[in-house]
Image: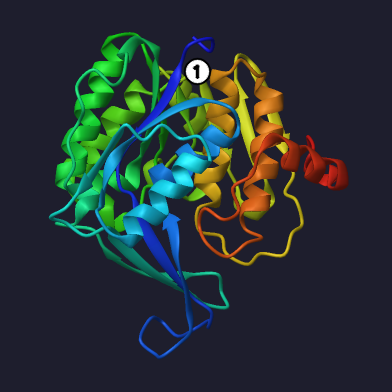
Amino acid sequence: MHETATIATVGEILVEFVSHRKNCGLREISDYSGPYPSGAPAIFLDQAARMGARTEMIGGVGDDGFGRAVLDRLTTDGVGTSGVTVSPDHSTGVAFVSYYDTGHRDFIFHLTNTAADSFLLPEGLLDPARTCLHVSAASLGNPAMRDMIMTTLRNVDEAGGKISCDPNARPELMRDDAVREALTEAIERSTFLMPSTSDLDFLFPDLSEDAAIDRLLAAKAEVIVIKRGAQGATVVGNGARFDFAGHPVDEIDPTGAGDCFGGTFVSLMVQGASLEEAGRMANAAGALAVTRRGPMEGNSGPAEIAAFLEQNAAGDIA
Protein backbone atom coordinates (compact mmCIF):
# COMPACT_ATOMS: atom_id res chain seq x y z
CA MET A 1 0.00 0.00 0.00
CA HIS A 2 2.87 2.39 0.73
CA GLU A 3 3.62 3.16 -2.93
CA THR A 4 0.41 5.12 -3.53
CA ALA A 5 -1.21 5.58 -0.12
CA THR A 6 -2.60 8.91 1.04
CA ILE A 7 -2.88 9.62 4.75
CA ALA A 8 -6.06 11.55 5.50
CA THR A 9 -7.73 13.03 8.55
CA VAL A 10 -11.22 14.38 9.14
CA GLY A 11 -11.66 16.74 12.06
CA GLU A 12 -11.04 20.04 13.75
CA ILE A 13 -8.70 22.72 12.53
CA LEU A 14 -8.18 25.62 14.93
CA VAL A 15 -5.75 28.12 16.35
CA GLU A 16 -4.50 28.06 19.92
CA PHE A 17 -3.40 30.71 22.39
CA VAL A 18 -0.98 29.60 25.11
CA SER A 19 -0.58 31.32 28.48
CA HIS A 20 2.98 32.19 29.46
CA ARG A 21 2.01 32.05 33.13
CA LYS A 22 1.53 28.76 34.95
CA ASN A 23 -1.16 28.06 37.54
CA CYS A 24 -3.43 30.88 36.32
CA GLY A 25 -6.20 28.44 35.41
CA LEU A 26 -7.36 30.65 32.51
CA ARG A 27 -9.05 32.91 35.06
CA GLU A 28 -6.32 35.46 35.77
CA ILE A 29 -4.78 38.07 33.49
CA SER A 30 -1.72 36.71 31.72
CA ASP A 31 0.35 37.18 28.59
CA TYR A 32 -0.55 34.75 25.80
CA SER A 33 1.18 33.69 22.58
CA GLY A 34 -0.78 32.86 19.46
CA PRO A 35 -2.44 32.23 17.13
CA TYR A 36 -0.65 28.87 16.86
CA PRO A 37 -1.98 26.44 14.20
CA SER A 38 -3.61 23.54 16.03
CA GLY A 39 -6.23 20.80 16.13
CA ALA A 40 -5.17 17.21 16.83
CA PRO A 41 -5.92 15.92 13.29
CA ALA A 42 -4.08 18.89 11.74
CA ILE A 43 -1.03 18.48 13.99
CA PHE A 44 -0.88 14.78 13.14
CA LEU A 45 -1.21 15.37 9.40
CA ASP A 46 1.26 18.25 9.30
CA GLN A 47 3.88 15.96 10.85
CA ALA A 48 2.99 13.10 8.48
CA ALA A 49 3.53 15.43 5.52
CA ARG A 50 6.83 16.68 6.92
CA MET A 51 7.96 13.05 7.08
CA GLY A 52 7.30 12.64 3.36
CA ALA A 53 3.80 11.15 3.11
CA ARG A 54 1.10 12.20 0.70
CA THR A 55 -1.69 13.75 2.78
CA GLU A 56 -5.20 15.21 2.62
CA MET A 57 -6.84 17.26 5.37
CA ILE A 58 -10.64 17.39 5.55
CA GLY A 59 -11.94 20.10 7.86
CA GLY A 60 -12.97 23.72 7.99
CA VAL A 61 -11.58 27.19 8.69
CA GLY A 62 -13.11 30.63 8.55
CA ASP A 63 -12.33 33.18 5.87
CA ASP A 64 -10.30 35.14 8.40
CA GLY A 65 -6.76 35.71 9.62
CA PHE A 66 -6.80 32.71 11.94
CA GLY A 67 -7.91 30.43 9.12
CA ARG A 68 -5.25 31.76 6.79
CA ALA A 69 -2.59 31.24 9.49
CA VAL A 70 -3.41 27.54 9.70
CA LEU A 71 -3.79 27.03 5.95
CA ASP A 72 -0.48 28.78 5.31
CA ARG A 73 1.27 26.44 7.75
CA LEU A 74 -0.32 23.29 6.35
CA THR A 75 0.42 24.23 2.75
CA THR A 76 3.99 25.25 3.53
CA ASP A 77 4.59 21.85 5.15
CA GLY A 78 3.12 19.95 2.19
CA VAL A 79 -0.31 19.00 3.53
CA GLY A 80 -3.02 18.53 0.90
CA THR A 81 -5.74 21.09 1.65
CA SER A 82 -8.19 20.49 -1.20
CA GLY A 83 -10.60 19.06 1.38
CA VAL A 84 -10.54 22.13 3.63
CA THR A 85 -13.73 24.21 3.50
CA VAL A 86 -13.11 27.95 3.86
CA SER A 87 -16.32 29.38 5.29
CA PRO A 88 -17.33 33.03 4.86
CA ASP A 89 -20.11 32.55 7.42
CA HIS A 90 -18.22 30.94 10.32
CA SER A 91 -15.10 31.98 12.20
CA THR A 92 -12.10 29.70 12.71
CA GLY A 93 -12.16 27.58 15.87
CA VAL A 94 -10.09 28.82 18.82
CA ALA A 95 -8.64 27.21 21.95
CA PHE A 96 -6.92 28.67 25.00
CA VAL A 97 -4.58 26.64 27.20
CA SER A 98 -2.68 27.20 30.42
CA TYR A 99 -0.42 24.90 32.40
CA TYR A 100 0.18 24.03 36.04
CA ASP A 101 3.46 23.14 37.72
CA THR A 102 2.10 19.59 38.01
CA GLY A 103 1.98 19.31 34.21
CA HIS A 104 -1.82 19.38 34.08
CA ARG A 105 -3.53 21.72 31.62
CA ASP A 106 -6.72 23.77 31.43
CA PHE A 107 -8.34 24.17 28.01
CA ILE A 108 -11.20 26.32 26.79
CA PHE A 109 -12.37 25.39 23.29
CA HIS A 110 -14.60 27.43 20.99
CA LEU A 111 -15.40 24.88 18.27
CA THR A 112 -19.14 24.15 18.12
CA ASN A 113 -20.90 26.15 15.38
CA THR A 114 -17.58 27.54 14.13
CA ALA A 115 -15.88 26.65 10.86
CA ALA A 116 -14.21 23.77 12.76
CA ASP A 117 -17.42 21.72 12.62
CA SER A 118 -19.11 23.40 9.64
CA PHE A 119 -17.47 21.71 6.68
CA LEU A 120 -18.41 19.19 4.02
CA LEU A 121 -16.97 15.84 2.97
CA PRO A 122 -15.73 16.41 -0.60
CA GLU A 123 -16.75 13.68 -3.03
CA GLY A 124 -14.01 11.94 -4.97
CA LEU A 125 -11.10 13.50 -3.09
CA LEU A 126 -9.93 10.19 -1.62
CA ASP A 127 -9.53 6.76 -3.18
CA PRO A 128 -10.68 4.73 -0.15
CA ALA A 129 -8.70 1.64 -1.14
CA ARG A 130 -5.47 3.68 -1.20
CA THR A 131 -6.16 5.73 1.91
CA CYS A 132 -4.92 5.42 5.47
CA LEU A 133 -7.45 7.36 7.56
CA HIS A 134 -6.27 8.58 10.94
CA VAL A 135 -8.91 9.04 13.64
CA SER A 136 -8.19 11.29 16.60
CA ALA A 137 -10.82 10.15 19.08
CA ALA A 138 -11.09 13.59 20.69
CA SER A 139 -12.82 14.71 17.46
CA LEU A 140 -15.59 12.16 18.03
CA GLY A 141 -17.07 14.30 20.80
CA ASN A 142 -18.53 16.70 18.25
CA PRO A 143 -21.66 15.14 16.63
CA ALA A 144 -21.17 16.81 13.23
CA MET A 145 -17.53 15.77 12.98
CA ARG A 146 -18.28 12.31 14.38
CA ASP A 147 -20.77 11.55 11.59
CA MET A 148 -18.30 12.61 8.90
CA ILE A 149 -15.41 10.72 10.49
CA MET A 150 -17.40 7.50 10.82
CA THR A 151 -18.76 7.73 7.26
CA THR A 152 -15.23 8.12 5.91
CA LEU A 153 -13.87 5.40 8.21
CA ARG A 154 -16.41 2.83 7.02
CA ASN A 155 -15.82 3.70 3.37
CA VAL A 156 -12.04 3.34 3.74
CA ASP A 157 -12.19 0.14 5.77
CA GLU A 158 -14.73 -1.57 3.51
CA ALA A 159 -12.70 -0.64 0.41
CA GLY A 160 -9.59 -2.27 1.85
CA GLY A 161 -7.81 0.87 3.02
CA LYS A 162 -6.22 1.22 6.44
CA ILE A 163 -7.29 2.95 9.66
CA SER A 164 -5.06 4.36 12.38
CA CYS A 165 -6.49 5.52 15.69
CA ASP A 166 -5.34 7.52 18.68
CA PRO A 167 -7.98 6.51 21.29
CA ASN A 168 -7.42 9.63 23.44
CA ALA A 169 -10.04 8.23 25.82
CA ARG A 170 -10.84 11.33 27.88
CA PRO A 171 -13.28 10.44 30.66
CA GLU A 172 -15.54 13.40 29.88
CA LEU A 173 -15.93 12.15 26.30
CA MET A 174 -16.40 8.52 27.22
CA ARG A 175 -19.46 9.33 29.33
CA ASP A 176 -21.26 9.96 26.02
CA ASP A 177 -22.62 6.64 24.70
CA ALA A 178 -22.43 7.79 21.06
CA VAL A 179 -18.75 8.69 21.45
CA ARG A 180 -17.93 5.43 23.18
CA GLU A 181 -19.71 3.41 20.47
CA ALA A 182 -17.90 5.31 17.71
CA LEU A 183 -14.52 4.84 19.40
CA THR A 184 -15.18 1.13 19.91
CA GLU A 185 -15.96 0.77 16.19
CA ALA A 186 -12.86 2.77 15.22
CA ILE A 187 -10.67 0.57 17.42
CA GLU A 188 -12.20 -2.61 15.98
CA ARG A 189 -11.54 -1.43 12.41
CA SER A 190 -7.99 -0.10 12.99
CA THR A 191 -4.74 -1.46 11.59
CA PHE A 192 -2.60 0.89 13.69
CA LEU A 193 -3.63 1.64 17.29
CA MET A 194 -1.68 4.20 19.31
CA PRO A 195 -3.06 4.39 22.86
CA SER A 196 -1.31 6.09 25.75
CA THR A 197 -0.88 4.21 29.01
CA SER A 198 -3.82 6.20 30.44
CA ASP A 199 -5.98 5.13 27.46
CA LEU A 200 -5.27 1.48 28.24
CA ASP A 201 -6.10 2.03 31.92
CA PHE A 202 -9.41 3.61 30.96
CA LEU A 203 -10.39 1.20 28.18
CA PHE A 204 -9.27 -1.99 29.97
CA PRO A 205 -9.30 -1.23 33.72
CA ASP A 206 -9.32 -4.93 34.64
CA LEU A 207 -6.47 -6.01 32.36
CA SER A 208 -2.71 -5.79 32.64
CA GLU A 209 -0.92 -3.88 29.89
CA ASP A 210 0.20 -7.10 28.17
CA ALA A 211 -3.33 -8.54 28.37
CA ALA A 212 -4.76 -5.33 26.91
CA ILE A 213 -2.27 -5.49 24.02
CA ASP A 214 -3.21 -9.12 23.37
CA ARG A 215 -6.90 -8.16 23.38
CA LEU A 216 -6.32 -5.45 20.79
CA LEU A 217 -4.14 -7.67 18.59
CA ALA A 218 -6.82 -10.37 18.67
CA ALA A 219 -9.07 -8.03 16.66
CA LYS A 220 -8.01 -6.39 13.37
CA ALA A 221 -5.04 -4.38 14.65
CA GLU A 222 -1.66 -5.35 13.24
CA VAL A 223 0.41 -2.85 15.22
CA ILE A 224 -0.05 -1.49 18.75
CA VAL A 225 1.96 1.51 19.91
CA ILE A 226 1.92 2.37 23.61
CA LYS A 227 2.83 6.02 24.19
CA ARG A 228 4.44 6.53 27.59
CA GLY A 229 5.10 10.28 27.48
CA ALA A 230 8.49 11.16 28.95
CA GLN A 231 9.13 7.43 29.58
CA GLY A 232 9.24 6.61 25.86
CA ALA A 233 7.14 4.13 23.91
CA THR A 234 6.53 0.47 23.07
CA VAL A 235 5.76 -0.89 19.61
CA VAL A 236 4.25 -4.37 19.21
CA GLY A 237 3.40 -6.08 15.92
CA ASN A 238 4.35 -8.82 13.45
CA GLY A 239 5.49 -11.00 16.34
CA ALA A 240 8.05 -8.42 17.49
CA ARG A 241 8.25 -5.94 20.36
CA PHE A 242 10.43 -2.84 20.64
CA ASP A 243 10.73 -0.75 23.81
CA PHE A 244 12.12 2.76 23.42
CA ALA A 245 13.42 4.75 26.37
CA GLY A 246 12.43 8.39 26.78
CA HIS A 247 14.69 11.25 25.69
CA PRO A 248 15.59 13.74 28.44
CA VAL A 249 14.53 17.16 27.10
CA ASP A 250 13.45 20.49 28.55
CA GLU A 251 9.66 20.46 28.29
CA ILE A 252 8.09 23.77 27.31
CA ASP A 253 4.73 22.74 25.84
CA PRO A 254 3.53 19.11 25.72
CA THR A 255 0.35 19.79 23.72
CA GLY A 256 0.43 18.00 20.39
CA ALA A 257 3.38 15.72 21.22
CA GLY A 258 1.27 12.57 20.94
CA ASP A 259 -0.12 13.73 17.58
CA CYS A 260 3.42 14.47 16.37
CA PHE A 261 4.51 10.98 17.50
CA GLY A 262 1.57 9.40 15.66
CA GLY A 263 2.06 11.43 12.49
CA THR A 264 5.69 10.33 12.34
CA PHE A 265 4.93 6.69 13.00
CA VAL A 266 2.04 6.28 10.55
CA SER A 267 3.81 8.29 7.84
CA LEU A 268 6.84 6.02 8.01
CA MET A 269 4.78 2.83 8.16
CA VAL A 270 2.77 3.85 5.10
CA GLN A 271 6.03 4.56 3.29
CA GLY A 272 7.34 1.07 4.07
CA ALA A 273 9.61 1.61 7.08
CA SER A 274 10.21 -1.16 9.60
CA LEU A 275 8.43 -1.16 12.97
CA GLU A 276 11.75 -0.52 14.71
CA GLU A 277 12.68 2.45 12.54
CA ALA A 278 9.20 3.99 12.67
CA GLY A 279 9.09 3.61 16.46
CA ARG A 280 12.58 5.03 16.95
CA MET A 281 11.89 8.08 14.78
CA ALA A 282 8.44 8.68 16.29
CA ASN A 283 9.83 8.45 19.82
CA ALA A 284 12.39 11.14 18.96
CA ALA A 285 9.82 13.32 17.18
CA GLY A 286 7.55 13.24 20.23
CA ALA A 287 10.44 14.37 22.43
CA LEU A 288 11.34 17.19 20.06
CA ALA A 289 7.72 18.33 19.98
CA VAL A 290 7.62 19.35 23.65
CA THR A 291 10.63 21.65 23.39
CA ARG A 292 8.80 24.52 21.66
CA ARG A 293 5.78 26.58 22.66
CA GLY A 294 2.76 25.94 20.43
CA PRO A 295 1.17 22.59 19.55
CA MET A 296 2.50 22.42 15.98
CA GLU A 297 5.70 24.40 16.45
CA GLY A 298 7.62 21.32 17.59
CA ASN A 299 6.86 19.32 14.44
CA SER A 300 10.01 18.24 12.61
CA GLY A 301 11.37 16.55 9.51
CA PRO A 302 13.64 13.52 8.97
CA ALA A 303 16.90 15.51 9.00
CA GLU A 304 16.09 17.24 12.29
CA ILE A 305 15.04 13.96 13.89
CA ALA A 306 18.20 12.20 12.65
CA ALA A 307 20.38 14.96 14.10
CA PHE A 308 18.52 14.75 17.41
CA LEU A 309 19.02 10.97 17.54
CA GLU A 310 22.75 11.34 16.90
CA GLN A 311 22.97 13.54 19.98
CA ASN A 312 20.51 11.56 22.13
CA ALA A 313 21.19 7.85 21.88
CA ALA A 314 19.27 7.25 25.16
CA GLY A 315 16.01 6.94 23.25
CA ASP A 316 17.16 3.91 21.31
CA ILE A 317 15.76 0.51 22.17
CA ALA A 318 15.69 0.14 25.95
- Residue 203 location (% of width, % of height): 38, 42
Mark 1 is on which residue type?
Glu
Rendered position, 172 above or below 150: below
Please name whichever residue, 107 or 211, is drawn nearer the observer in this view of the structure: 107
Residue bearing the label numbered 1: 222
> Element at badge 1?
loop
Number of marks present in the image shown: 1
Asked if residue 232 can be seen in this view, the reply is: yes
Give the residue drawn at x 86%, y 41%: 310
Quarter of the picture holding the C terminus: top right
Q: What's the colour scheme?
A: rainbow
Give the residue drawn at x 28%, y 59%: 64
Asked if residue 209 can be seen in this view, the reply is: no
- Residue 225 location (% of width, % of height): 56, 33
Is 132 displayed left or right of 258 in the figure?
Answer: left
Please name whichever residue, 293 or 213, is drawn nearer the observer in this view of the structure: 293
Give the residue drawn at x 77%, y 43%: 315
- Residue 262 location (% of width, % of height): 53, 37
Rendered position, 156 above or below 21: above
Is 130 displayed left or right of 151 in the figure?
Answer: right
Rendered position, 156 above or below 96: above
- Residue 193 location (% of width, % of height): 46, 30
